[in-house]
Amino acid sequence: MDNLTELKGNWNETKGKLKQKFASLTDDDLLLVEGKQDEMLGRLQKKLGKTKDELHKLIEKL
């Protein structure tokens, strides 16, 4: 997930898959704003109880 351009290109699809897998996630939780991707990952870590590495692996598998 280091390549923000690649992530942003597929983000709508990835966001939909995450919402299907984790019903508790909202659009606000998954809001990807340039320069604030760490903030978004922090929200996801807190809400899902996962580490940053676990989130990276989870998103890569989707």
Image (spheres, rainbow, N blue to C red):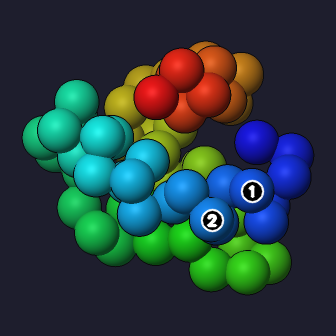
Quarter of the image where one finds residue 36: bottom right
Residue 45 lies, in percent from the top left, at 52, 37
Q: Nearer the viewer, residue 41 or 19?
A: 19
Residue 54's label in the rendered image is none
| Amino acid under disc 1 | Glu
Seen at 86% across and 46% down, the residue is 2
The image shows residue 6, relative to residue 22, as above or below, that is: below
The image position of residue 18, as x and y in percent, is: 33, 40
Q: Which residue corresponds to the image point at 46% horizontal and 72% vertical from the top-left?
A: 31
Q: Which residue is disc 2 drawn over? A: 9
- Label 1 sits on a secondary structure element that is helix
Residue holding disc 1: 6
> In the rendered view, would you say 30 is above or below 33?
above
Residue extending furthest toward the bottom: 34
Q: In the image, what residue type sits under mark 2?
A: Gly
Q: Is residue 5 visible?
A: yes
For label 2, the SS is: helix
Relative horizontal placement of residue 5, taking residue 45 as reference (left or right)? right
15 lies left or right of 42? left
Whether pointer 2 and pointer 1 mark residues with C-beta atoms closer than 8 Å, the reply is: yes
